[in-house]
Image: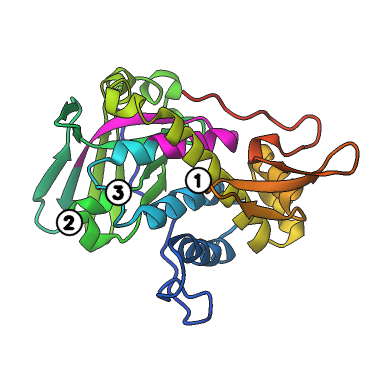
Amino acid sequence: MPKSRRRKPASRRPRPSGRPGDPRRADLSPVARAQAFVGELIKAGDPSDPLLVTAVPAWFLALLTAGQVPAERCADDCVILAHAYAQLGLASQVRAAELTVADRATGLGQVFGTRQPCWRNGLLDGHTVLWLPDAGHLVDTTAGQYPPVAALHPGPVVTRLACDPADDRRDGYGHDAFTVTIEVASADLHYTLAPLAASSTVLDHPVMTHEAAGHRRRGGNVAALTVSLLADHLPSGRSRDIPHPRVAALVDAVRSLPRHQTPDGDWRFEVTGPDGTPLARSLAEVPVPDGTPAAAAWP
């Protein structure tokens, strides 16, 4: 199985500043705390780095669901993120994964998850991550459910696969099993992704299909907030540096639009209709220039 070169994850947790936007403040709502934290992440990042767009929705969702959703339900986060990335024009796959946390000094390792997941009493016996095949990015929003990872790396794991130019990615990184190795502090995280066919065991279970509409709705909201945060925290001239054309177009499109949250919790942008009447529209309905890439398909 192909294995990546060891590479440290690009996303770093910014230190709280103590200013009014400090995400530690107890008087902020969960959404406001997540917005404050991710805003600092964006300001500290490089918009030309493809990993920034991947990291923003992952961090936002991880912060928003911290303590609210059982960590074992990692599949929910993966599907929500898959819908969010699709709105941003990024294709992704939910992949069952076996995670080995190996101490670099002792050589000892602990294994979590399995390449053969199953459901028991409504909970997934296994672990899932999100794989973005075109970008070569891996996202694990619930890695912190495992104590050895939580002690080494607060927050989601968001990293890119570093591969040799000679690697043939058409098959090995598409549907077959492969391993991504990441250096985190004093340990290596070895993610072995199961063949894509194993994902059906996770996604086709009634627990997941029953929540399909909710997953799609939450994913759309995560995408809307991602674009809004990028528009709020990147100077207007920097949006052209975003290497994802659809994301760059959406950021420019919403930058000056009023936005609000509906009583149902959905985020809407105010656009002007043909007769001058304000219209509330979802991110998917916001007008973008001709030639802007379409949203990606999911599933």
In primary-sequence order, the first of circles 1 and 2 is 1
- Amino acid found under the numbered disc labelled 3: Val
- Extent of the magenta region: 79-99
Q: Label 2 near label 1: C-beta < 8 Å?
A: no
Q: Nearer the viewer, residue 251 or 80?
A: 80
Task: Report whether 56 appears left or right of 13.
Answer: right
Q: In the rendered image of this protein, does residue 221 appear above or below residue 66? A: above
Disc 3 to disc 1, C-alpha distance? 21 Å
Disc 1 to disc 2, C-alpha distance? 24 Å
User: Looking at the rendering, in which quadrant would you find the N terminus?
Assistant: top left
In primary-sequence order, the first of circles 3 and 1 is 1
Q: In the rendered image of this protein, does residue 19 appear above or below residue 51? A: below
Disc 2 to disc 3, C-alpha distance? 20 Å
> Which residue, given by chain and number where applicable, does mark 3 sit on?
69
> Which residue, given by chain and number where applicable, does mark 1 sit on?
54
- Amino acid found under the numbered disc labelled 2: Pro
> Which residue, given by chain and number where applicable, does mark 2 sit on?
148
Residue 34 lies in magenta, yes or no?
A: no
